[in-house]
Image (cartoon, rainbow, N blue to C red):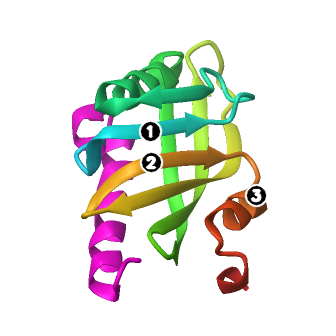
């Protein structure tokens, strides 16, 4: 379970990771990750599935930007729950082949151990993420 200081530090690290991803700095985006991190994306997402280790996470993040002229993932809310932090994300993607932005609201759930992310599990449905993380009651 994360204490308040650990939670504050973890949230600051996640904010920095999203900012790094948005500017295309994949190496900085994964600095908070344990070397054996497990990265899970919904199968309905492009490239969805499970990725293992920092290199797997970098591979997913790199390919998720490959077909886009611009990608912006904005964390809207951080919801601590035990050793996890649920992040409500507003993502916008401008495909290279289009002038129309695609928008999605989703949730990423990060599991922490010893100050490092050991798992990231993305959800297309925010309520599913809250349930999975055991944060349902604290979100009200």
Residue beneath label 3, please?
Answer: 128
Q: Residue at x 32, y 37 (%)?
A: 36
- Relative to 91, residue 13 above or below: below
Instruction: State yes or no: discs 1 and 3 in contact (Cβ < 8 Å).
Output: no
State the CA–CA distance, disc 3 to disc 2: 16 Å
Instruction: State yes or no: discs 1 and 2 in contact (Cβ < 8 Å).
Output: yes
In the rendered view, does 46 fall on the left or right side of 111?
right
Circle 3: element type: helix
- Relative to 73, residue 83 above or below: below
In the rendered view, does 115 fall on the left or right side of 136?
left
Numbered badge on residue 119 = 2
> Where's residue 8, x and y in %?
32, 78
Circle 2: element type: strand
In the rendered view, does 98 fall on the left or right side of 73?
right
- Relative to 132, residue 17 above or below: above
Circle 1: element type: strand
- Range of the magenta residues? 1-29
Q: Residue at x 73, y 66 (%)?
A: 131
Residue beneath label 1, please?
Answer: 38
Of callouts 3 and 2, the N-terminal one: 2
| Quadrant housing the C terminus | bottom right
């Amino acid at each position: 379970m994360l204490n308040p200081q650990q939670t504050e530090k973890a949230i600051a690290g996640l904010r920095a990771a999203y900012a790094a991803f948005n500017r295309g700095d994949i190496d900085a985006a994964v600095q908070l990750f344990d070397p054996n991190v497990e990265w899970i994306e919904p199968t309905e997402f492009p490239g969805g599935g499970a990725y293992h280790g920092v290199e797997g996470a970098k591979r997913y993040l790199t390919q998720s930007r490959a077909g886009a002229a611009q990608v912006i993932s904005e964390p809207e809310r951080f919801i601590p729950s035990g050793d996890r932090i649920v992040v409500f994300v507003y993502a916008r993607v401008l495909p290279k082949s289009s002038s129309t932005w695609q928008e999605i609201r989703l949730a990423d759930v990060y599991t922490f151990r010893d100050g490092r992310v050991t798992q990231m599990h993305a959800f297309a449905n925010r309520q599913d993420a809250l349930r999975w993380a055991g944060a349902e009651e604290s979100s009200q």
